[in-house]
Amino acid sequence: MQVGRKLGVGAAAAVLAGSALSLGAVAGASEPPPNPGQDESMPAQPQPTQQEEGQGPGAIVVGPEGAAKALERLQYANAQRAQWCHGTVQVTKLNVRSGPGTNYPVQYTVKKNQPVNTDWSRIVRRHGYLWVPLSNNYWLADYKLGDGNGKWYIKYTNC
């Protein structure tokens, strides 16, 4: 784009009303804008992912009652509740991360119908999900928070 080069990066940014620039050229519409002041050769700072943790069909969508029930798990971590819950992955692919949040790296994924054992005594709410650790101390999002709704990625049999 000839105009962008003549006007310079700052003026072109104003003319393009917020479009992302990379070395004087307009970035593709599908690319996110670069982080201000971040050198591209430096590793990116962890950012919450844009893609949902549980991918593909099969999540169990719940209404307000189901959402309230899911959030109750955060409040009632006690000896009466089952610590290890056995379930089956309901979505095509579910990320397993090194910690409880989308800013932790994905270590591997679990597939639909794969059994998992999660520790409900250590539930954490972060980045729009309820995170639970697995027996290998990696974490997965077993529930996606919603606007009074939400959805389970795992169908539990004993919790």
Image (cartoon, rainbow, N blue to C red):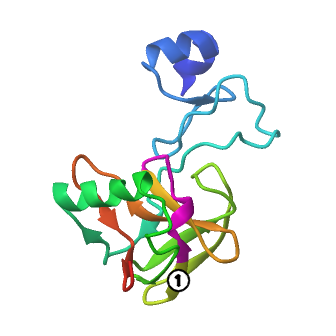
Q: Residues within 10 Å of mark 1 (few under 14, many from 20)?
A: some
**Does residue 19 appear left or right of residue 56 in this picture?**
right
Q: Position of residue 9 (x, y in %)?
A: 62, 16
Q: Which residues are magenta?
A: 118-128
Residue 95 vs residue 1, the one in the foreground: 95
Nearest the camera: 116 or 23? 116
- Look at the picture and state if 118 lies above or below 141: below
Residue shown at the point (30%, 64%) measured from the top left: 151
Residue at x 52%, y 73% (from the top left corner): 83
> Looking at the picture, does residue 134 appear above or below residue 146?
below
Residue 127 part of the magenta segment: yes
Q: Position of residue 101 (x, y in %)?
A: 58, 52
Q: Is residue 114 above or below residue 71?
A: below
Quadrant of image for the N terminus? top right
Task: Using the rendered view, name the quadrant where residue 69 is placed.
Answer: bottom left
Q: Amino acid at mark 1?
A: Val
Q: Report the residue marked by disc 1.
A: 116
Q: Secondary structure at mark 1?
A: strand
- Extreme residue toward the front, this view: 80
| Residue placed most toward the observer, 112 or 5 | 112
Q: Position of residue 63 (x, y in %)?
A: 17, 59
Q: Is residue 143 magenta?
A: no
Residue at the image position 56 percent from the left and 23 percent from the top: 2
Placement of 99 over or under 16, stated as above or below: below
Q: Position of residue 104 (x, y in %)?
A: 66, 54
* Quarter that holds the C terminus: bottom left
- Give the residue furthest to the right: 41
Residue 90 visible to the viewer: no
Residue 48 image-quadrant placement: top right
Residue 111 visible here: yes
User: Which sits in the foreground, 33 or 16?
Assistant: 33
